[in-house]
Image (cartoon, grey):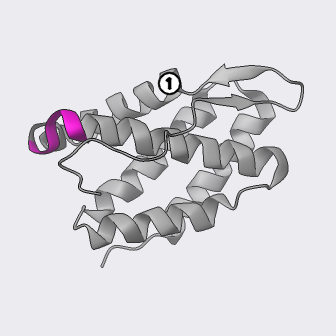
Amino acid sequence: MNRSSPPGGATPPQSFEFPTGTRIDLAPLARHLCDLYYGVYPDDLKCYGPAGQAWCDHDSRYLIAWALEDARAGAVDCVAQVRWLGRVLAARSFPIDHFIRHVELAAAVLRRSELGDIGDRAAARLSNAASQLTCP
């Protein structure tokens, strides 16, 4: 995969199901997260263009879904997944400090969401993951 080409392969998670059976669409959360990210790093929008926007949405959906799944049932190890993605991005020369900030912003989005306790627990997992990432 190349960050200058749009994502291919598996489609990122589209929704999340609460234990009650209620589903939420992840698109609005991912969109908000990408808006925040590009507010911090507007040059990335210029540098990576539409493919970068597609990757931002793709990765944002995964970050949010991993955190929510971990918070709901521990079925996903959010910290391990974020560390894996950080290694992938670093290998592709994506600035790891930008990724760390993206994860921090994802935590903030979940913390401010109206998802209740599960959103708070998911935010805590992302904050923990961000704290374990290091810049080379």
Q: Return the residue found at the far front.
A: 9
Front-lying residue, 65 or 43: 65
- Packing grade of label 1 (10 A; few <14, some 14-19, many >=20) is some
> Going 69% across and 42% down the picture, which residue do you hit?
68
Q: For residue 76, which quarter of the picture?
A: bottom right
Q: Quadrant of the N terminus?
A: bottom left
Q: Is residue 16 magenta?
A: no
Q: Indicate the amino acid at tag 1.
A: Ala
- Image: magenta residue range: 47-51
Residue sitting at the far right = 20
* Residue 110 picture quarter: top right
Picture residue at 33% right of the left edge, 63% below the top: 89
Image location (x, y in percent) of residue 136: 30, 79
Q: Is residue 60 above or below residue 125?
A: above
Q: Is residue 57 left or right of residue 53?
A: right
Q: What's the residue at 19%, 32% (across, down)? A: 50
Q: Secondary structure at mark 1?
A: helix
Q: Is residue 133 left or right of residue 16?
A: left
Measuring from the top left, give residue 119's x and y in whole percent: 70, 36
Residue 107 visible? The answer is: no
Residue drawn at (73%, 52%), measured in percent from left and top? 70
Looking at the image, residue 99 lies above or below residue 61: below
Q: Is residue 64 left or right of residue 74?
A: left
Residue 42: where, in percent of width, then height?
A: 17, 37
Query: Is residue 126 visible in this depiction of the protein?
Result: yes
Q: Which residue is mark 1?
A: 27
x and y, in percent, of residue 82 in the image: 52, 61
Task: Say how many tags the image has.
Answer: 1
Q: Which secondary structure class fits the magenta region best?
A: helix
